[in-house]
Amino acid sequence: MARSITLLLALIAITGYLMSLGYKSPADKHALLVSAALAAIVQISAFGLVHMAGRNNALAAWGLGTIFRGTVLAFYGFFLIKMLQLPHSAALVSFAVFLFASMLLESLLMSYDAS
């Protein structure tokens, strides 16, 4: 689990840096940071679910994690962005990219653990 979290945080940092090259305003950079923090929390929870499920139930846990991610993305888009007064484009695009990239990492880690 520690390896997964370390790789996740490194991936989010690299992805966030790359997106900050396009989103240059202070408000956009703040939205990137908020999205990165939220994505890290969501992904660590989803990684934990998959690790707790074990090999026999890994696919079901991964599916539940995907539903959880989608639900948080919708909640973020409909409510949190307005409450935190974040720029919509930077917040939603960065959060979706963080989730997508870390889901790819999760599938790589699952296949690595299975072998």
Image (tube, rainbow, N blue to C red):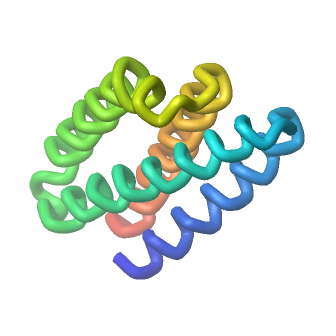
> Looking at the picture, how far across and down is residue 93, in whole percent?
61, 27
Residue 60 left/right relative to 17: left
Return the residue nearer the eye: 63 or 55. Answer: 63
107 is higher (above) or lower (below) than 75? below
75 or 84: which is nearer to us?
84
Is 36 on the left-hand or right-hand side of 18?
left
x then y, percent, for residue 16 = 70, 50
The correct choice, above or below, for 74 with respect to 53 in the image is above
Q: Quadrant of the C terminus?
A: bottom left
Question: Where 17 falls versus 21 (above or below)?
Answer: below
The image quarter containing residue 78 is top left
Residue drawn at the location 81% of the way across and 35% of the way down: 23
Foreground: 53 or 75?
75
Decide which of 27, 57 is in the foreground and name it.
27
Instruction: Determine the image quadrant of residue 73.
Output: top left
Query: Which residue is found at the position 35% from the left and 24% from the top?
Result: 79
Q: Tell me how many marks there are.
A: 0
Quadrant assignment for the N terminus: bottom left
Percent coordinates x, y for residue 29 in the rendering: 73, 44
Q: Residue at x 18, y 39 (%)?
A: 64
Q: Residue 52 appears in which quarter of the rendering?
A: bottom left
Q: Residue 70, position in %: x, y?
A: 32, 28
Identified at 59% across, 21% down, the residue is: 88
Q: Is residue 15 left or right of residue 92?
A: right
